[in-house]
Amino acid sequence: MSYGSKAAQRLANKIILITGASGGIGEATAREIAGAANGNVKLILTARRKEKLDALAKDLSAKYPSIQTHAAQFDVSKIETIKPFISNLPSDFADIDVLINNAGLALGRDPVGQIAEEDISQMFNTNVLGLITLTQTVLPIFKKKNSGDIVNLGSIAGRDPYPGGSIYCATKASVKFFSHALRKELIDTRIRVLEVDPGNVETDFSLVRYKNDSDKAKAVYEGTEPLLADDIAEIIVFGITRRENAVIAETLVFASGQASASHLYRKKL
Ligand SMILES: NC(=O)c1ccc[n+]([C@@H]2O[C@H](COP(=O)([O-])OP(=O)(O)OC[C@H]3O[C@@H](n4cnc5c(N)ncnc54)[C@H](OP(=O)(O)O)[C@@H]3O)[C@@H](O)[C@H]2O)c1
């Protein structure tokens, strides 16, 4: 999508760190930013699957000769690695302007009492502790220059909890309250906190949730017309390209045919 020259100007030369850029919403956001900036931007692309990041960086460089990318393996659930990761960024990429906290996952649909302990820790470590620790680590960079954007991926799950989603919903509710409190703490700064809460988006999210059971993953979207990763990427780019005094604080995004976490219109197939 074209955002016009204003958006390109506002993104020009910015250093943008995206977590979970190896697929889904994170990858779509990297592509959307590159396009909106006409390649005049620096992207720090992070996730666990380095080969996917390398392929994305290569593709972006082929499309936008002026783009600068730093693709780095970075597991946000490994909390102790976060500070060293940020302090060891190449100097060209160290002065981050935008942090997109996108990495996240749901694991399983088990009821409380039957949830695997490792699934609970993986969801909390990734979606909550990783996001909080990375934000705390990057915030001094923003405070020093009194500017910067923090984009947190929440979810409808953080507003409308559903059976079988207790842990994932609790992680996304944590993201919401962390984002609210942080926005209040930063009231006298030019640092913006943006939260985007998608409904169902067809990505690898359900495949990850159902641990590679593709039939279960497909069933989530059957008879519906879910959002695409690009839809969320466009909203993120819209948010970070507003005039610096305008804060798109929270955005709840549904596809038509969805009205709550579980209120979905399904066509009979
Ligand atoms: N899809 C939806 O319906 C939906 C709805 C609401 C909110 N969301 C949220 O949107 C965000 C993106 O999800 P998606 O739909 O794009 O899912 P996805 O296609 O499964 O992508 C998730 C991304 O997060 C990365 N990731 C997972 N664990 C990580 C870790 N420990 N460290 C670093 N990166 C990690 C994955 O990369 P690696 O595997 O390479 O690490 C991948 O790039 C998540 O926060 C999710 O909760 C999604």
Image (cartoon, rainbow, N blue to C red):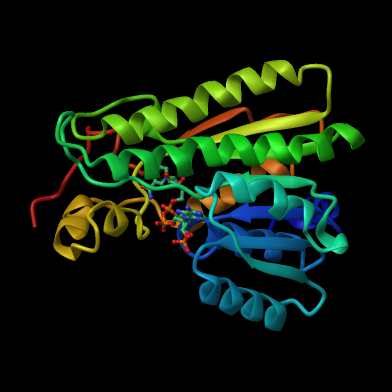
In the figure, is residue 123 to the left or right of 230? Answer: left
Q: Say above or below: 262 vs 94.
A: above
**Residue under the image location 81 percent in, 28 percent down:** 245
* Res. 201 in view: yes
* Res. 260 in view: no
Residue 109 pos. (x, y %): 20, 41
**Residue under the image location 77 percent in, 17 percent down:** 187
In the figure, is residue 31 to the left or right of 49? Answer: right
Q: Say above or below: 189 vs 264.
A: above
User: Which image quadrant for residue 38?
Assistant: bottom right
**Residue under the image location 66 percent in, 37 percent down:** 135
**Residue under the image location 43 percent in, 26 percent down:** 173
Q: Residue furthest bottom?
A: 62
Marks counted in the figure total 0
Residue 6 pos. (x, y %): 82, 50
In the figure, is residue 86 to the left or right of 267? Answer: right
Q: Residue furthest front?
A: 80
Residue 95 pos. (x, y %): 85, 50
- 267 or 71: which is nearer to us? 71
Q: Residue furthest right?
A: 145
Q: Say above or below: 112 vs 138.
A: above
User: Which image quadrant for residue 219?
Assistant: bottom left
Which quarter shows the N terminus? bottom right
Which quarter shows the C terminus? bottom left
- 48 or 206: which is nearer to us? 48
Residue 195 pos. (x, y %): 57, 33
